[in-house]
Amino acid sequence: MIIELIREFFRDMNSHRMRTVLTLIAITWGTMSVVLLLAFGEGFGTAMRNGMVNAWNRVLIVYGGETGKVYQGLPKGRGVNLEESDVTLLKATVPNIVMISPQYRKNAELFYGKTRLTTECEGAGPDFEVMRAMYPEAGGRFIDANDIKYQKRSLFLGYEIAGDLFKGENPIGKTVMLDNVPFTVIGIMEKKLQTSMNNGPDSRRAVIPYSTFRMIYGYEHINTILIKAASPSMQTRMISDIRQVLGRKYRFDPTDERAVGIFDTMMIDEIIKKVSLGVNIFLGVVGFFTLMIAGVGVANVMYVVVKERTREIGIEIAVGAKRVHILSQFVFEALFLSLLGGTLGLLLSWGIVYAMSFVNTSSGPMQFLGRPILSIGIMLFTVIVLTLIGLFAGVFPARRAAGVDPVESLRYE
């Protein structure tokens, strides 16, 4: 039965070669439009999410504020300034904290050779590396526990500012003057895409041990505390726990959000996911309507086939062919034509996506666009759309064919 239907399909298509070829091209082009638009949309969304994670790897940022409520006889408007001891306190009392680091911050001057630059300098701990995705290039390292314990003058640099300072030299082990204090460069951050900034990109940042920062600059209060939970799902509960602990220490209402600010970077992640979904829906709709136009071509071919085979269909009905047999014959041909063009489109799309894997996306506009991603979901969506188009393109001509009057069909020219 299937073999006979396939033979019938190729016989019909052979009699309308030009129309069939043009329709196949339209289906192939439409399929490529859907697949590539969705693949580039998926790649764009992934690049944006990676850029966000490279700035804030799903962390909580805790910073001091000003009380907004009267509490235990104390007036509102009192300042809450965080200290290094709060890091130890939170780690000991708040469950499910897996990483935590204080963060000092100020503008500082770097001097090496004849080059003098001003940049953002941060004092941080070892966990800062993962929470801010500031991973070192091969041959270097980030701040470690010994740097903190012995207040070492260790310096970690972003790759851009390191390039400006050393101009091609290997910076590891070199001495740099940081606000007229000598520091040894221990590592250079590897390149990364960063779509969220905090006083400039990490590529132009200098990081030193927080204990050294405090010793040199004499800061009593830290700017922020970065905290990473064991699971992102725990962060909402953790925010409440942090306010409870700090509220007891600094004597403010735990429900007073102004006393201690806590920014959950997962909020940005959710926004990016929604933007990415919106872009994918828009691109999918555009590609779907492009494919629908090709489906009209399939329907036209099938109507022509029905018209030319009217006498043959009438004879088949007269000798006992059932309506379902006539319907299945033309629906099968429409589906086969749609899926044949769709298969060609998928193969060409895969080839383009594969070729894009060799394109450099680490710099320029391409780092924000990202590489296209041909996922199982995209291919499944495309196959479903092609199947629906084939069904709709075949059902109406098939119904017309199945409704042919055997007597009238013999008079048809």
Image (spheres, helix red, strand yellow):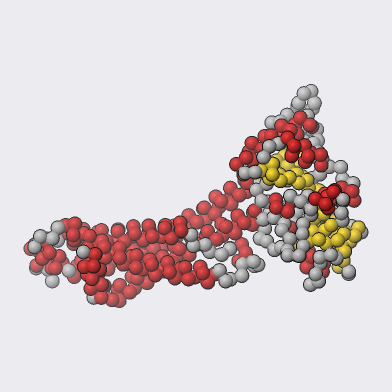
Placement of the N terminus among the 4 image quadrants: bottom left
Q: Nearer the viewer, residue 45 or 132?
A: 132
Q: Residue 6: x and y, percent?
A: 25, 68
Which residue is at 87% across, 54% downward?
Answer: 152
Residue 184, percent from left and from top: 86, 61
Rendered view: 75 above or below 210? above
Q: Nearer the viewer, residue 114 or 281?
A: 114
The residue positioned farthest toward the right in the image shown? 180
Is residue 158 visible to us here? no
The residue that appears at 77% across and 62% down in the rendered structure is: 140
Give me the residue at 51% from left, 53% from top: 278
Expressed as whole percent of the image width and height from the top left, the position of residue 321 reads 13, 60
Q: Quadrant of the C terminus?
A: bottom left
Q: Residue at x 48, y 65 (%)?
A: 36
Which percent across, then down, holds residue 287?
44, 61
Identify whether 14 is placed above or below 51.
below
Image mark count? 0
Q: Nearer the viewer, residue 118 or 137?
A: 137
Residue projecting furthest to the top:
73
Asked where in the image residue 48 lies, by quadrant, the reply is bottom right
Lateral position of residue 379 relative to residue 175, left or right: left
Residue 276 in view here: yes
